[in-house]
Amino acid sequence: MRGTSIIELIIYGAILALLSVFAINTFLLISSAFGEVRLTRQVNASAELIMGRMIREIRFGKSVYASSVFGVHPSRLSFVTFTSPSDDTEVDGDIQVSGMNLLFQKGSAGAIQLNTDDVGVTNFVLREITSANSVAVKIELELQASTTKRAVTKKFYGTAVMRGSY
């Protein structure tokens, strides 16, 4: 007798099914991992831009207004700053949360959104640190990026001393 028997066909079919399940599972795991890496990269990139801009603007500041809100979410920082490094004209600066967006306003210019549209601010707490010679602001920022299947949330911290305060 030549050819394959029904038992051999069943065994070959079972082996093919197992290999297919393994390949599909591997593909789904890799796809999931890439999705999470993409979201983490979005959060990290947005945090780098936000923290860099806030720390730079706070360091450039001179003093904090009493209308600032510290120690709670959402915090708000209203402060005196300068128009530019080469211009000593004092202007007001304001950093606050509106919805899931972090906004920065300097002088009479309109507020700009610091975070990207695909990353939201889930927690924003500022703390004022005051000494006899200077004022500093500690930043606690939590960002989230999400899709319909997964979400990535990360916390970031920074501190800036107002250079105009000493």
Image: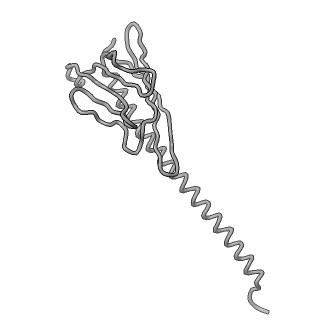
At horizontal 33% and vertical 13% (from top left) the residue drawn is 165
At horizontal 74% and vertical 86% (from top left) the residue drawn is 4
Quadrant where the C terminus lies? top left
Residue farthest to the top?
132
Q: Can you say whether 27 is above or below 133 in the image?
A: below
Residue farthest to the right?
1
Q: Position of residue 156 (x, y in %)?
A: 47, 31
Residue nearest the observer in this picture, 38 or 110: 110
| In-image side of 33 versus 123 (left or right) | right
Q: Position of residue 143 (x, y in %)?
A: 45, 37
Count of numbered badges drawn on the protein: 0
Quadrant where the N terminus lies? bottom right
Residue farthest to the front?
99
| In-image side of 95 versus 22 (left or right) | left
At horizontal 29% and vertical 35% (from top left) the residue drawn is 112
Image quarter of residue 164: top left
Residue nearest the observer in this picture, 34 or 108: 108
Q: Can you say whether 27 is above or below 142 in the image?
A: below
Q: Position of residue 70 (x, y in %)?
A: 42, 20
| In-image side of 51 versus 5 (left or right) | left
At horizontal 46% and vertical 32% (from top left) the residue drawn is 123
Q: Position of residue 83 (x, y in %)?
A: 22, 24
